[in-house]
Each structure stands twice: as structure tokens, then as C-alpha cells.
Image: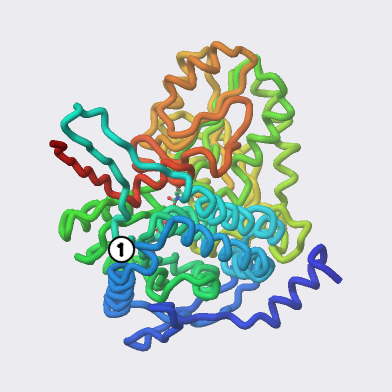
Amino acid sequence: MDFHHQQYWQQRAQALKIENRLFINGRYLPATEGGTFAVDDPAGQRELTQVARATGVDVDLAVRAAREAFERGDWSQASPAQRKSTLATLATLMEQHAETLALLETLDTGKPIRHSLRDDIPGAIRCIRWYAEAIDKVYGEIAPTGNDSLALIAREPVGVVGAIVPWNFPLQLACWKLGPALATGNSVVLKPSEKSPLSAIYLAQLATQAGLPDGVLNVVPGYGHDAGKALALHHDVDALTFTGSTQVAKQLLIYAGESNMKRVWLEAGGKSANIIFADCPDIDKAAQNAAAGIFYNQGQVCIAGTRLLVEESIQQPFLQALRRHAAAFTPGDPLDPTSAMGTLIDSDHRQKVANAIERGLQQGATLFLDGRTHPLGDHDGYLGPTILTAVDNRMDLAREEIFGPVLAVTTFNGEQQAIQLANDSDYGLGAALWTRDLSRAHRLSRQLKAGSVFVNNYNDGDMTVPFGGYKQSGNGRDKSLHALEKFTELKTTWISLD
Ligand code: NAD
């Protein structure tokens, strides 16, 4: 039996020994105050383990270890080629442990094992390897000064980086921070979400095994208001890199202002519009992408295409195609490799998503596909694809991030209305448009206020391109060489020449 079978994963899950301690200065440790918190499997509705609960004391220990490592210099001063070699080894070790990492991710979050295996873990590995490969190819600059001087512009690591990440893609998003932060020579204190800390805890020992010096990577699982807040308020953290909700992102800016003005880089929420023009090149393909764009990962994707703007004349055929493609996302046991949809992160979150659907109906939207009535859909964390039509852009359905498999459909007539609706949002993470008209594609891509614009696809891209948002979707960018800017300070050395 191999990884194509549900039983294979069930057996592996039963035999799995889960590491559940903090990782500080190269060692696993219990929390100083002895606290723990339960980490559950949302599909099996069982407790997986009790994880050590970091508090301010542990965060302080971790920041101290990170600072000492940074000052010691065996990582921060190592040559880019040396850092490349260690991070490449880490990527190789992650490959060797890919099944365990995928299993931890699926048990912890309820996402389908086939997606953890195909997307999350390979994505995390590719990220670490990409930054490893990149770092010895990045040059400084010489400024165009006069002949009497020489001005060198170099990038130096910021020092101690605090990384706070959410639960929807736990390892992958952690690696979007770790890759560029470590490659540039920083030390990191990583706080995973209290809902999904297991893969980050596991990764820590692989990093040590790969040769990362003690204290360079520390992992402090704990609650946001406790360990997260302590990290964000810490006076010896030089930069904070965050992925999560806009609400917490705003709070982090306040913490930075109240403490040491640490640099704060935010990847926050979204309410992205997917615009389907009547001259869409292929309705079936667009509908398939629209379904995947909102139902993948149970809709818990920051850049999910949650608002479908469809030109009125093609609404009916488009909705019919969409219904067919939504059927591919029938919820099932996450450990069954044939499942394309698992459970939401927990039953509380499912309730919030169900409440958002109910509120939408009360505000006048029409139910076109109801995921709440799926056989698995009325208990635990399961909720199937849901589509609401006749959504007005002023309704909560169109304005608030739901973070579940709920698509809000609004019709429009003509380009101007499409742009106006798409940009009428507090968020600006992604936007997509489907058209045969090349000029229209370029025109709109300039006018859409979003960090990524997709033309005739939804959410394509890879490590080579930046990811992040306009407006309240955040600042700074993850991925690509641009991410290095967040983890480095610019240093000018001006030399007068005789
Ligand atoms: P969240 O904001 O509740 O939590 C994110 C992290 O912040 C967690 O580790 C949490 O413990 C921590 N946290 C919470 N309160 C804190 C505080 N007061 N101080 C310090 N840390 C604190 O978000 P979530 O529910 O885990 O994730 C879902 C959100 O993440 C959605 O809004 C989604 O759009 C966003 N997200 C954004 C991106 C992006 O790249 N823009 C990617 C994925 C997810």
C-alpha cells in the first residue's frame, strides 16, 4: 500500500510521534511557565497533542538566543555561498521528510492530503531552495558620484526578525518569511498560529540538522495575544514580518510604535474580484478557474477570488458551468487522497462562515448553491461550495473577508462598471479579468488597485514574482528578490578620494 490510499495515511497518522515543544537556541524545550494548549485534528475531531505554550518569558529567551547568534556571526557573517549550501541542505531534508510534513499539515488544518503533498510542502521546499540559489547572485551598487569619491551601497541583514504566520498554509507561509530572512543572514523567531504549529516545530530540527547554527531559527508556538504580542512589542526585534488578518496587522503597527519602531511588513486580508467579460475566451475554463479560485483550500486563501463580477449577458451560462466545476470540490476525509476538499480549520470558523451566508441571505442575496446541505456539511468543520447571486457591492458578502468556500456573484455591464466595482473595496490583494481583448487586458491591469492582476487565469505565478497587497491588504512583498528588501537595511559607505 502506498500514498495513493487512505489507509496508508490513516496508519501513518496513528503511528506519528508529534514533537510538541518550543525550539530555542537549537534545542526543544517545554515552556518556562509549564503551560500547554491543545492542538486538534479538525476532521477527526480529536486532540492530536498538547503543545508547549510560549509566553513572554520564552519569547524573551528566543529573542536573546537570536540576538546572540546574530552577534556571534557564524550565520550573519557567513559568506552567501555558505548560507546557500546550508539552506539547500535544508530543502533536501524537507524533501526527504515531505510525507511527514504533509501529514502534519493535513492533520493540523483539515486540508486534503493530496494538496499538502502536491502544493504546500513542495511550495515550501521550492521557496527555501529558491532563496538558497539566489543569495550568492545578488550584488550591491556603486553610486554615480564624481571622481573625488566612491559611494558603495550594500544590503546588510536587519538583525533579529520576528515572523508571525497564520494557519491556512502554515509551512509554506512560514517559508516565505524564512527563505529571504535566513538567506540574507538574519536570525529569526517564528511564531506559528496556535491552530497549526506542528509543521513549523518539526521544521526546526531539520534546519539544525542542515547545519543552521544554534539560535538562528527559534520557534515559539503560542497564542497571538500572548506570545505574538510579546514578540511584536519586543525592544530587541528589528523587523516583524506578518501574514494574517488586517485587524491584527493594524495592531502590529501600533505595537511597533509603542516599542522600538521595528520595521513591520504585513501580508493581510483580501476580497479579490474575478471579472468575467462577455468576450471571455473560454467560459468553461474561466468557470473552472473561478471555482478553484474560491473553493481550493476550503476557501481559506487570502487571495481567493471571493467576488465574481460577471458581465450580465453571460451570467446564466457561466453560472451553469460554475455549478458543474464546484462539484469537483465535494468535501471528504482529508486523509483520503481522492478528496479535493477537506474541513475548515475548526467548527467555530465553520459557524462564522455559515453566519456570513445567513447574513447575506438576510441582506437580499440569492442562494444558487448551498454547501451547508452537503451530507458532511452540517457538522464539524465541513462546509461545501456555496454560491450566492444578486450580491450588491454594499452587502457584507461583498465587503468582508469570509475566509470560507463562499462565492459572491455580482453582475455588471461594461468596463467602467467592472473597474468601479472591483476597486470599491478596502482590500487590494488580487484581481483577475477574462477577455480576448488585449488592449482591454492592459488597460484594466493598469487601473485595478491590486498587488497581482491575473489575465485569463486565476492566481497563477511562482516564486519569481512578488506577492502582496495594495490598501488594507498590506505592505511590502513576499516572494521574488523583492522580498530581500524587507530583511535588509541599505548601507551607504561614502569614501572621499584624494
Ligand atoms: P490572524 O490575524 O488571526 O492570526 C495570524 C497570526 O497572528 C497568528 O499566528 C496569531 O496567533 C497571531 N496574532 C493574533 N493576534 C495577535 C496579536 N495581538 N499580536 C501578535 N500576534 C497576534 O489570522 P488567521 O486567522 O490566522 O489567518 C487568516 C487571515 O490571514 C486572513 O485574514 C487571511 O486573508 C490572511 N492571510 C493573508 C495572506 C497574504 O499573503 N496577504 C496569506 C494568508 C492569509
Disc 1 crowd, CA 10 A, few/some/many (<14, 14-19, 20+)? many
- The image position of residue 247, as x and y in percent, is 33, 51
Query: Residue visible at 73% across and 38% down?
Result: 325
The amino acid pointed to by label 1 is Val
Give the camera-side residue of 195 and 45.
Answer: 195
Q: Disc 1 marks which residue?
A: 160
Give the camera-side residue of 355 and 439.
Answer: 439
Quadrant hosting ligand 1: bottom left
Give the camera-side residue of 74 and 229.
Answer: 74
- The image position of residue 283, as x and y in percent, is 71, 24
**Colour scheme of the picture:** rainbow
On the image, which quarter does residue 433 sit in? top right
Figure quadrant of the N terminus: bottom right
Q: Is residue 226 visible?
A: no
Query: Residue visible at 34% across and 62% down?
Result: 162
- The image position of residue 50, as x and y in percent, is 49, 82
**SS under mark 1:** strand
Whether the residue under disc 1 has CB within 8 Å of ligand 1: no
Figure quadrant of the C terminus: top left
Query: Residue visible at 74% across and 28% down?
Result: 284
Give the camera-side residue of 114 and 209.
Answer: 209
Q: Is residue 154 visible?
A: yes
- Left or right: 13 in relation to 258: right
